[in-house]
Amino acid sequence: MSERLVVIGGDAAGMSAASQARRLKGRQELEIVAFERGHFSSYSACGIPYWVGGDVASRGELIARSPEEHRARGIGLRTRTEVTEIDVPGQRVLARDLEAGTETWTGFDKLVIATGARPRRPEVPGIDAPPEGAPPGVHGVQTLDDGQALLDSLAGTEGRRAVVVGAGYIGVEMAEALLNRGYAVTVLNRGEQPMATLDPDMGRLVHRAMDGLGIRTVGSAAVTKILTGAGGRVRAVATDADEYPADVVVLGTGVVPETSLARAAGLPLGAHGGLLTDPAMRVRGQENVWAGGDCVEVLDLVSGRERYVPLGTHANKQGQVIGANVGGDYATFPGVVGTAVSKVCDLEIARTGLREKDAREVGLRFVTVTVESTSRAGYYPGAAPMTVKMLAERRTGRLLGVQIVGREGAAKRVDVAAVALTARMTVEQVAALDLGYAPPFSPVWDPVLIAARKAVAAVRAAG
């Protein structure tokens, strides 16, 4: 007798789970029905800023697999259909066809919740919670539909002034995209420095570089109101200290887990609002309900606590794990160390592990070191400056975190630190790593190794 798998969400986690389950189970054994409220499936949301900025030529290049391709592979994907209720005891979901306005119940034997995240929107006058309620010219950037709406807005805007609200990953990437489009860009950030995922001293380097690129970056600027002009279109963004003229506004204030359905269904949520799962990505306390992607919290392997890290890399891996378990195989998702990279123009930004703030919150005693180095041998053409900050546990010397800000060749060096964190290596062990060397690629002592050597000395000095 055939079972039915229902998937809520048609992007990375949901469709990875559906595809993996389909590979393991034939169509006679497993029926798969997936619901997606947007027009598109299996796309790279991370690529949207580069599409908006013109580095990626077309929307289609961001789509890994279309709805039609999923259907051809035996997955009943229903686009423009939004699930509005989950009845866990009754093993069914209620879905609304957004075009026809009709609602239907669909039963399931197994359920995957991959509802993703939603943009955090400032609760200020001029911004209504539903995206369609915002004034013309104000945009969130979370889906391909959002990206297309922003491009349409840019094409219909005569002025060339842009304000980005927020200076996290999306904020700085959208600042670059708008700069590439010829806009005068102002970034308003609630914190003192951009990139709150870094320590403030490293964020200060990003701030200085953004100013040097012609991006006006204003810290400690909490938005108080969106001001509109003729026709209701945005004309400025107000803070408690000033007004910033704007022909277009992009919200880069981060995201929160989209777990309203899960909350209403009584499923367990963590401190950050994300669904809680076991290592097999099964929702805790449920036998036949799984969850993955930007709607879940994950185990931080460094701190040992749950955290919220919405990244496509995790979503795809979690989807693979879910699909394997649904399909009768077995797999687990062990957790994360919090690795992320980004860029704004030619400035590369990377981090992994804990910030100073994170280490204090979990009660760790630590030392920090910061070193200045270059991406290549200093005498080799193209050598670019790089700053590396490293945290180590005071007593044991265990590596706790690394942050890197620099030019070409800086960001991906964080991968060495990510491996070391996963392996729970000490900074002394990191300093002894046999990394590749040649003048076009690195100084004799790689910047990460220089930081590790300095951290060893700091640990020893601290006793």
Image (cartoon, rainbow, N blue to C red):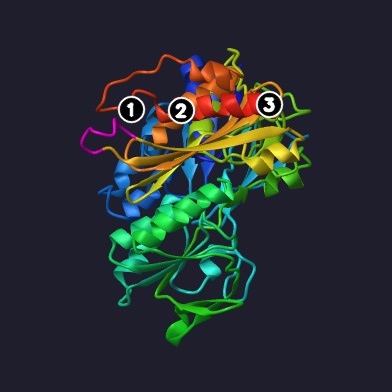
Task: Determine the CA span between mark 3 and mark 1.
Answer: 46 Å
* SS type, badge 2: helix
**Do the residues under discs 2 and 3 have CB atoms within 8 angstroms?**
no
x, y percent for residue 208: 43, 57
First in sequence: mark 2 or mark 1? 1
Expressed as whole percent of the image width and height from the top left, the position of residue 254 reads: 56, 53
Label 1, secondary structure: give it: loop
Query: Which amino acid, by three-letter code, is at mark 2?
Result: Ile
State the predominant SS element of the stretch in magenta.
Answer: loop
Identify the residue at image location x=20%, y=36%. Answer: 381
- What residue is at 38 percent from the left and 63 percent from the top? 215
Identify the residue shown where x is 40% and y is 32%. Answer: 412
Contact, mark 2 vs mark 1 (Cβ under 8 Å): yes
Secondary structure type for disc 3: loop
How far is mark 2 from mark 3, CA to CA? 42 Å
The mark that comes first in sequence, 2 or 3, is 3
Q: Nearer the viewer, residue 423 or 325?
A: 423
Q: From this viewpoint, which residue is outermost toward the bottom? A: 230
Question: Where in the figure is residue 48, as x and y percent of width and height?
Answer: 39, 49
* In the displayed structure image, the side of residue 279 where residue 181 appears, left or right: left
Say which label, 3 or 1, has the lower sequence index.
Answer: 3
Q: Which residue is mark 2?
A: 450
Q: Quadrant of the N terminus?
A: top right
The three-letter amino acid code for the residue at tag 3 is: Arg
Does residue 405 belong to the magenta stretch? no
- The residue that disc 3 covers is 282
Residue visible at 62% across and 50% down in the picture: 256
Label 2, label 1: how far apart the Cα atoms are: 10 Å
**Which residues fall within the magenta stretch?**
375-382
**Image quadrant where residue 91 sits:** top right
The mark found on residue 443 in the picture is 1
Q: Which amino acid type is marked by label 1? A: Pro
